[in-house]
Amino acid sequence: KILILDFGSQYTQLIARRIREIGVYSEIFSCDCDADEIKRFAPKGIILSGGPETVTIDDTPRAPQYVFEAGVPVLGICYGLQTMTEQLGGKVESSHHREFGYAQIRARGHSQLLFDIEDHVSPEGYGLLDVWMSHGDRVTELPEGFKRIASSDGAPIAGIANEEKHFYGLQFHPEVTHTKQGGRILSRFVLEICGCEALWTADNIIEDSIRAVRAKVGSDQVILGLSGGVDSSVVAALLHKAIGGQLTCVFVDTGLLRLNEGDQVMAMFAEHMGIKVIRVDAEARYMAALNGVADPERKRKIIGGLFVEIFDEEAARLTDAKWLAQGTIYPDVIESAGAKSGKAHLIKSHHNVGGLPENMTLKLVEPLRELFKDEVRKLGLELGLPADMIHRHPFPGPGLGVRILGEVKKDYADLLRRADAIFIEELYRHDLYSKVSQAFAVFLPVKSVGVMGDGRRYDYVIALRAVETIDFMTARWAHLPYEFLDLVSRRIINEVPGISRVTYDISGKPPATIEWE
Ligand code: XMP
């Protein structure tokens, strides 16, 4: 396995993703972790990520010195190269010649890292690589024992190597797809230089996971919080296949779910698949707890807290349950380790019962911990879950609680559910659902005037939101056809009494977020 030390680059997770694609396990640690943590992880190689800082001032992050004493290969990328250079006695300077974006580097064929990897050959016989650069500083003096293995116009020292120690540094980013040979370079490092084996192939995932779960839990009882989302659904299907009747799921109907969602979950898991599912109808409790609360973050806390409370009550009833299953997936693992903002982590910890009390005696089983989302989906399909469910848009843990602006009321939730269902139904019908990444309706508790027949009426407003995004960090609003929006608007106003006006949200992220609260 490979350790990635994160210096705050926006690309750190991409490094993990690429290594995963090579078939090798990796984890991201913060750059201020200590030697003991690294020893415990026992990596076969270490990658130092890029980062926004500069090593030309003293108090910016450095790698723990142990990295260079561990006796394993090290690859520094961008800031990683610079800190390696500086820490090992070379020199880095700020340069007026910044390089951002596409660049061509000359690679010298004599390093193990870049040997025989090239996009073109220069007239002088150098290998040329098309790469992605993003740096201001550059290396101006090599540390002792190092040689130069690549150069570009903006960075005369664009790659360095100490072949004896297997330390390498690259000024460009091999992890982004714009660096065409990036995959080969990383795979050269991970497989050949570090000697990792590519053991992880998609075919083996189900068999491996089932074997691992059985070995782990033996004949113990396992409890799982089932939300109906992709991750917990796949865990349910997988555990059911692995341990059958030893699994009990708890499904909490918060009253903040989508139209008929509770019934659908029960029909699918309890009736169709024969899984033990305890359905807790908690709508009244949720509405009471949310009564009079308008602040979004307080609402989130209440919704999450109540979920934990209810789940706990149910778990206490199942006295012989020894394991708690969670739908943690690999991005959660690397995000919670690497993310500075911690937001992604919070989202998951709410979603998955992560907030259970400290004194919890249940042990954790997380069968999807090493899988990326697309692998989880594949696994779900192979386990027989319906494609619709597997490809459903994400739905936030707090549900409609953050799509009803301000105070949450049952009446509002009922109106919103119906409007949302119409929007989604039409998206499917017009073959648009899978073309957008997330779509939903938002309830605005303001009254706007409308005319129905001869009378004026003052009713509520629904905002429709549909976005296209890859990573949900940035998003553009979906350019849905006017005719389509027209149809959805008419249907909502005609079919949902209490709504007199429909608007479409045309804000991108940033600056707006995807959700309204
Ligand atoms: P924002 O609104 O931050 O949303 O642009 C990005 C993605 O995260 C989801 N989201 C949440 N998911 N609990 C969740 O489980 C939350 O509190 C939460 N807030 C936002 C949102 O639906 C979108 O997919």
Image (tube, rainbow, N blue to C red):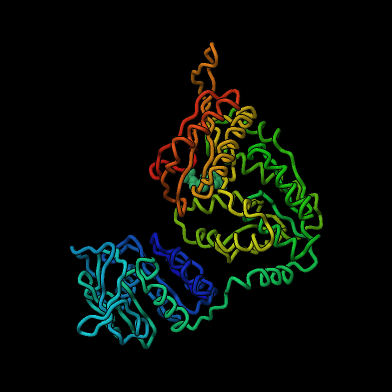
| Image quadrant assignment for residue 90 | bottom left
Residue drawn at x 51%, y 33% is: 487
Outermost residue on the left side: it is: 96
Where residue 257 appears, as percent x and y from the top left, is 64, 40
User: How far across and down, in percent of the image, does residue 197 sit?
Assistant: 53, 81
* Residue in the picture at 46% in, 82% down: 194
Q: Measuring from the top left, give residue 107's x and y in whole percent.
A: 28, 80
Asked if one can make out residue 268 in the rendered structure from this viewpoint, the answer is yes
Asked whether the viewer can see residue 143, the reply is no
Q: Nearer the viewer, residue 46 or 213?
A: 213
Q: State whether residue 217 is above or below residue 389.
A: below
Residue at 65 percent across and 33 percent down: it is: 289
Residue at the (77%, 52%) spot, across then down? 272
Percent position (x, y) of residue 265? 71, 47
Left or right, 326 with reference to 272: left
In screen coordinates, is 239 left or right of 90?
Answer: right
- Which quarter of the picture shows residue 504? top left
The answer to whether residue 249 is above or below residue 77 is above
